[in-house]
């Protein structure tokens, strides 16, 4: 008999931008998804006592720890949520799974596929629920795009074009940060934002079989914060472009950059199929642009579907039609699914398998950029 949990006690490791986004998700699940298991914000872990105490208070957690190992030892915690820099994901996730805790981890899952492989193995061996936080899958318009593709409304898919454009690093005086150091982050724009468009297109179009890419670091040295006159070497990419072939025959063109002036967080895709096309842009995330070639002559063109109607995935949890939702609700939706999965002890995508497959693609793009040739993506059974 499956015991359905009514409450899930959360331990969060890390508390910056993503800590806030995930906490908002936990806090809002009972409000918008009252039938789901209720998250209880038990404790946050962080190394700096003053910072973690303040974060616990601000984000609404009952207590804090200054060592994540203490969080994992606690028997009043069911779920470990990892929002720390990438180099610590594997160690924390494996320890959590081995202690029998369910785990959710920020993207990219790991520094490389070898680490991701070990994380998946630990989660599977210990029978815990595992998820990776690819929140953009949970925008109603993206879920609706998936439904249209699955129903065959676009027919055979020929093209996917996906870009994730940011510009926060363009100032050469922007100091070196953890996201610019390979040993902490793995890769640069590629793993940070390229991972999102890889996930979206794997979700919508399917598995990639081979990739060829190019990467560039435009500003190779940056000032070190609070150390006047000193600079550090940037050893990850500022921008990455790649093309891919998919298992179903589709072709993909991708770009991830932190040097697209004026684009603060432009996550977009366009998919062209046999019978039509769809387009989505995070900056207008409720809208899905749909073109269907079956439309009458004279009415041919892209229509804008505002995915806020009751029929649109997740939309009925919120407001009446036309009352839009935002970035933060992608986390509320994701976490509501995680609560459901843990309470019923079932798996929920995207999970560590998706994190591993994504990492295999990231690693292949880096290899391809070095070797200047196509690299095949190893396929794992799911
Ligand atoms: C920074 O580039 C960042 O916060 C990413 O780390 C997130 O994954 C993305 O959603 C927004 O930008």
Image: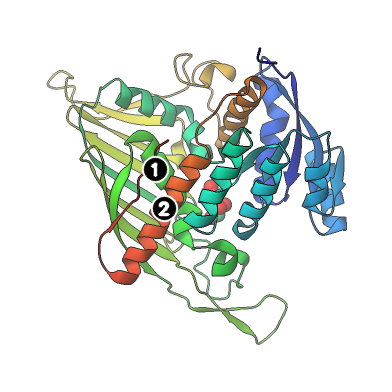
Between 114 and 76, the one lying in front of the other is 114
Q: Is residue 79 above or below residue 5?
A: below
Between 359 and 243, the one lying in front of the other is 359
Return the residue at label 1.
380
Relative side of 254 to 287, left or right = left
Quarter in which the N terminus is drawn: top right
In this rendering, which labeled residue sits more in front, label 1 or label 2?
A: 1
Residue at disc 2, secondary structure: helix
Dot 1 or dot 2: first in sequence order is: 2
* Residue 169: percent from left, percent from top: 52, 66
Residue 319 visible in the picture = no
Image quadrant where residue 120 sits: top right
Q: CA distance from mark 1 to mark 2?
A: 10 Å
* Residue 341: percent from left, percent from top: 60, 25
* Residue 361: percent from left, percent from top: 39, 52
Q: Residue at x 46, y 41 (%)?
A: 354
Image quadrant where residue 60 sits: top right
Return the residue at label 2.
360
């Amino acid at each position: 008999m499956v015991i359905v949990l009514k409450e899930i006690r959360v331990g969060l490791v890390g508390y910056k931008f993503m800590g806030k986004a995930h906490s908002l998700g936990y806090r809002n699940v009972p409000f918008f998804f009252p039938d789901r298991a209720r998250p209880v914000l038990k404790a946050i872990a962080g190394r700096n006592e003053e910072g973690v105490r303040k974060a616990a208070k601000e984000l609404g957690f009952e207590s804090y720890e200054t060592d994540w190992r203490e969080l994992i030892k606690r028997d009043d915690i069911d779920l470990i949520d990892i929002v720390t820099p990438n180099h610590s994901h594997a160690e924390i996730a494996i320890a959590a799974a081995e202690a029998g805790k369910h785990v959710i981890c920020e993207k990219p899952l790991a520094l490389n596929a070898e680490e991701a492989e070990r994380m998946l193995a630990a989660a599977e061996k210990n029978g815990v629920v595992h998820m990776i936080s690819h929140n953009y899958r949970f925008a109603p318009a993206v879920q609706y795009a998936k439904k249209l593709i699955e129903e065959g409304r676009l027919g055979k898919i020929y093209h996917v074009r996906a870009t994730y454009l940011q510009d926060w690093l363009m100032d050469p005086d922007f100091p070196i940060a953890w996201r610019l150091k390979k040993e902490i982050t793995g890769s640069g724009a590629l793993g940070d934002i390229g991972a999102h468009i890889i996930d979206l297109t794997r979700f919508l179009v399917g598995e990639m079989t081979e990739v060829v890419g190019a990467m560039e670091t435009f500003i190779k040295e940056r000032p070190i914060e609070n150390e006047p006159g000193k600079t550090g070497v940037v050893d990850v990419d500022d921008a990455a472009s790649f093309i891919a072939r998919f298992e179903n025959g589709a072709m993909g063109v991708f770009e991830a950059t932190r040097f697209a002036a004026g684009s603060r967080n432009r996550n977009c895709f366009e998919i062209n199929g046999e019978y039509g096309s769809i387009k989505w842009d995070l900056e207008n995330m409720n809208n899905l642009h749909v073109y269907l070639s079956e439309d009458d002559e004279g009415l041919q063109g892209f229509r804008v579907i505002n995915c806020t109607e009751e029929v649109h995935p997740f939309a009925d949890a919120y407001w009446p039609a036309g009352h839009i939702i935002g970035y933060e609700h992608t986390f509320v939706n994701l976490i509501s699914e995680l609560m459901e999965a843990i309470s019923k002890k079932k798996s929920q995508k995207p999970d560590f398998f998706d994190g591993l497959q994504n990492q295999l693609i990231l690693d292949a793009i880096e290899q391809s950029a070095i070797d200047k040739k196509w690299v095949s993506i190893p396929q794992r059974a799911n």
